[in-house]
Amino acid sequence: MNDPRCNETLEERIARVVREAVAVVPYDPDWPESFWREKEHLEACLPGGLIRRIEHFGSTAIPGMAAKPIIDMLVEVVSLKETRKRVVPILERQGYEYFWRPGWGEDGVPWYAWLIKRDALGVRTHHLHMVECSFPHWDAILFRDYLVEHAEAARAYATLKIGLARQYANDRVGYTKAKAEFITTVTEQAKRARGEPSSADSGN
């Protein structure tokens, strides 16, 4: 049977994806293994020389953290132009959904390659965020590490997400935007704790 998603316009695909339910569930100790299996798969099937580091980030990377049961993976690529030409077609043939999407922040740049992996039932299992080394997405690793090291901040984040998941049950964009202030604040704290310049320090 043909997949009806194949006949969707880009606008229809985006509308479908952002309306999918937001569900925050208790921590699953199998999440790290799910990350490692996917990392090994990507390293085995993608062209050599284009992929550098692959990191597990987001709430599923924080032990004990309630989260949406989707493994977020940050993939450093040498070139996004080559990634779109040589990596995306391989993953699309395997059933991944691909979007060329704007990055975080109000200005919407830089754009990057984002892919969704689903299981046999169509449920999301992984998000792949493919970016170059200079992209601001790598601040997410600082956020992850800070919450691993600071239990009180992790508990506050979990409480926030559980409440927002109820409020934005079918609005993934709204859910993500509502978390942004907390994430920004904690990321700035993480930078200061490591002696790195933060946006507040620079006056930006």
Image (cartoon, grey):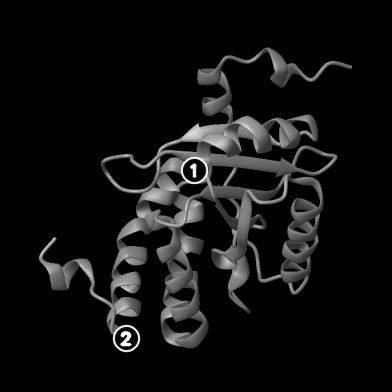
Instruction: Give the label on residue 181, or none.
Output: none
Q: Is residue 40 above or below residue 95?
A: below
| Residue nearest the viewer, comparing 28 with 90 | 90
| Quadrant of the image occupied by residue 10 | top right
Asked whether residue 19 appears in the rendered view, the answer is no
Quadrant position of the C terminus in the picture: bottom left
Task: List x then y, in percent, for residue 160.
Answer: 43, 66
- Which residue in the rendered view is the most extreme toward the right? 1
Residue drawn at x 66%, y 34% is: 86
Relative horizontal placement of residue 33, taking residue 82 as reference (left or right): right
Is residue 61 visible to the viewer in this orientation of the structure?
Answer: yes
How would you rate the neighbour count of disc 2 (Cα within 10 Å): few for under 14, some for 14-19, many for 20 or more? few
Task: Give the residue type at disc 1.
Answer: Arg
Q: Which residue: 55% across, 48% down?
A: 130
Residues 73 and 150: in front is 73
Residue behind mark 1: 172
Residue 35 locus on image (x, y percent): 72, 63
In the displayed structure image, the side of residue 89 where residue 21 appears, left or right: left
Q: Residue furthest left?
A: 203
> Mark 2 — residue?
193
Residue under the image location 57 percent in, 14 percent down: 9
Tag 2: residue type?
Answer: Ala
Q: Residue at x 63, y 61 (%)?
A: 54
Q: Quadrant of the N terminus?
A: top right
Instruction: Return the residue nearer the eye: 147 or 139.
Output: 139
Mark 2 and mark 1: Cα distance apart in space:
31 Å
Q: In the image, residue 52 lies at what x, y percent?
A: 61, 59
Q: Position of residue 194 (x, y in %)?
A: 34, 84
Q: Secondary structure at mark 2?
A: helix
